[in-house]
Image (cartoon, rainbow, N blue to C red):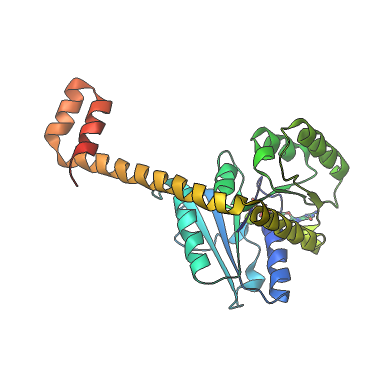
Amino acid sequence: MAGFTGAPGTGKSTLVDAVIALLRKQGSSVAVLATDPNSPFTGGAIMGDRIRMQRHALDGKVYIRSMGARGHLGGLSLATREAIRLLGGFGFDQVILETVGVGQSELEVAAVADTTVVVLTPNLGDSVQMIKAGILEIADVFVVNKADIDGYARVVAELRTMMNMAPKREWRPPIIPTIASRGEGVDKVWDAVLGHRKHLATSGKAQELVERRLRDETAEVAAELARERARRALEDDPALAERLLNDGTPYRTAEEILDRKG
Ligand SMILES: Nc1nc2c(ncn2[C@@H]2O[C@H](COP(=O)(O)OP(=O)(O)OP(=O)(O)O)[C@@H](O)[C@H]2O)c(=O)[nH]1
Ligand SMILES: [Mg+2]
């Protein structure tokens, strides 16, 4: 599963739209999940503007949905993982995730995706912002989109310098220029995704990822369940809530709740 992330407006949807076209030409079916950490949970409605893939709407082998995070139990990441598992289960050949990179969300992409594609533009503002956000450690492929506007060479040079300063990784993320709005370079982006996927498989990292994710997700689900249980216990048991208020002992109260049967 490949995840595309990047600052708002860098061209992620345009790029993913072009990737869909490429994959369809090759005969593959594809599911795209677009998540927006700033929007309320939409339960599958298309957030029109954020998605530029409508031309595929009538293609039965393309499935596109978007999800907002607000109000959803556990935020975006648990819901995203569940949705991705479902889409994989439905038998789509490729599953792609698009997430607007704001704050923590790009780290969530990396936690969920096998291959994280970070989309930058020649606008220096985005690149500095992304690099600050620790994006260097999570990117498996860098795309510098909007290569048709000035400043492309500068962003690439800046990225290379940052990469040379960062701790060496076994996989060196390629930097790929694209003009997504014209479909240029999109095949190279997909080749890079496949190249990284192959690296994961041959290095044994793919299996490691599966195991680590199952563990992380279990811990997250357990935390959510415990949170719900605590909320309910305090609502349903006025004596307990009263004691908590009097003693001011959240740790002890939490342990007591978790120690209760059922
Ligand atoms: N000049 C230029 N504009 C582009 C290119 N690719 C996309 N755009 C334009 O950039 C704008 C944003 O594109 P989107 O694909 O919606 O960007 P996004 O990253 O998905 O945006 P959010 O989902 O809102 O974060 C649109 O007006 C696109 O037409 C490109 O290669 N060159
Ligand atoms: Mg978008």
Q: Nearer the viewer, residue 133 or 215?
A: 215
Q: Nearer the viewer, residue 3 or 246?
A: 3
Position of residue 24 measured from the top left corner of the image (x, y, whole percent): 69, 74
Q: Quadrant of residue 165?
A: top right
- In this picture, is 9 found above or below 187? above
**Is residue 89 visible in this depiction of the protein?**
yes
Residue drawn at x 66%, y 72% is 55
Position of residue 159 measured from the top left corner of the image (x, y, whole percent): 79, 38
Position of residue 98 measured from the top left corner of the image (x, y, whole percent): 61, 55
Q: Residue furthest left?
A: 239
- In this picture, is 255 found above or below 72? above
Q: The N terminus appears in which quarter of the rendering?
A: bottom right
Q: Residue furthest top?
A: 247
Q: Quadrant of ligand 2?
A: bottom right
**Is residue 112 visible in this depiction of the protein?**
no
Q: Is residue 38 left or right of residue 30?
A: left
Position of residue 186 measured from the top left corner of the image (x, y, whole percent): 77, 61
- In this picture, is 54 found above or below 147? below
- In this picture, is 58 found above or below 87? below
Q: Is residue 219 left or right of residue 199?
A: left
Residue drawn at x 69%, y 58% is 198
Q: Nearer the viewer, residue 188 or 207?
A: 207
Residue drawn at x 62%, y 45% is 101
Residue drawn at x 66%, y 38% is 137
Instruction: Give the mark count.
Output: 0
Q: Quadrant of residue 82?
A: bottom left
